[in-house]
Image: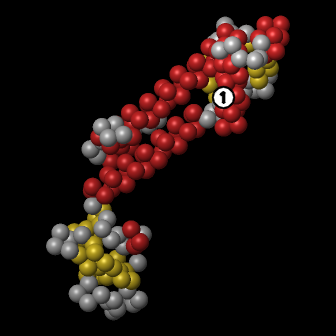
Amino acid sequence: MRISVLTDQNQAITSYGVCLSTDHNPLPNGIIVDTDIDIETIVGNYTLQNGILVIIPDIGLRDAKQAKIIEVTQAYQTELNGTFPSSAIGNVLVYDYSLESQTLWKELRDTIGKTVDGGDLPDSVLFPNGEMSITLADNTKVPHTRDQLQQVLQEIVSRKLSLYQKLQDMITVGGRILSAGTIDEVNLISW
């Protein structure tokens, strides 16, 4: 595409116009450039160097950091809202922690908390025969004692805190992403 651009004193693109023909220059004093860059992104993001549009390095780094923050935040959400292992009953089982399951886990935590605090629900209601069946990620049901369930619930809290801390160590001021000095450094960061 052929465009005409105007620049500031630092050669940063300040405006552009699309050339309708090889002889057409829509901007008085505009410099004609042939490019395949998305023209909607050039103002403020590119400079003109020897007749070639060049991305402003800080803008590219800023955009790379923003994209990486979005990427790791999505990875955090995916991992948080997925499955998790626990060996609370002795062997490793995989539990569901999807958005739907989180409500059930919270209700279970609150219900067990009431009985621990001397609430109205006796253990014989929640744990007939000393156990409660919990549905795992693969939809199998496995009996758990009160102590085993409390351990799973504690592991949920620990896991959530650990994942949140990992995210914060990556995205906050002083974190790995914002501290990266080059686009290559940003690209090396993964969840």
Task: Locate residue 154: give its quadrant.
Answer: top right
On the rendered image, what quadrant is the N terminus found in? bottom left
Q: Is residue 35 above or below residue 171?
A: below
Label tally:
1
Across and down, in percent, residue 148 comes to 67, 11
Q: Is residue 130 left or right of residue 53?
A: right
Viewer-side residue, 108 vs 26: 108
- Residue located 36% across and 73% down the image: 35
Across and down, in percent, residue 54 comes to 28, 64
Q: Is residue 139 left or right of residue 69?
A: right
Across and down, in percent, residue 11 comes to 20, 71
The secondary structure type at the circle numbered 1 is helix
Task: Locate residue 155: give its quadrant.
Answer: top right
Residue lying farthest to the left in this orientation: 9
Q: Is residue 129 above or below residue 40?
A: above
Q: Which residue is mark 1?
A: 106
Q: Is residue 191 above or below residue 158?
A: below
Viewer-side residue, 95 vs 54: 95
Q: Is residue 48 left or right of residue 35?
A: left
Q: Is residue 139 visible?
A: yes
- Residue located 44% across and 31% down the image: 166
Q: Amino acid at mark 1?
A: Lys
- Residue located 39% across and 68% down the image: 41
Across and down, in percent, residue 140 comes to 79, 22
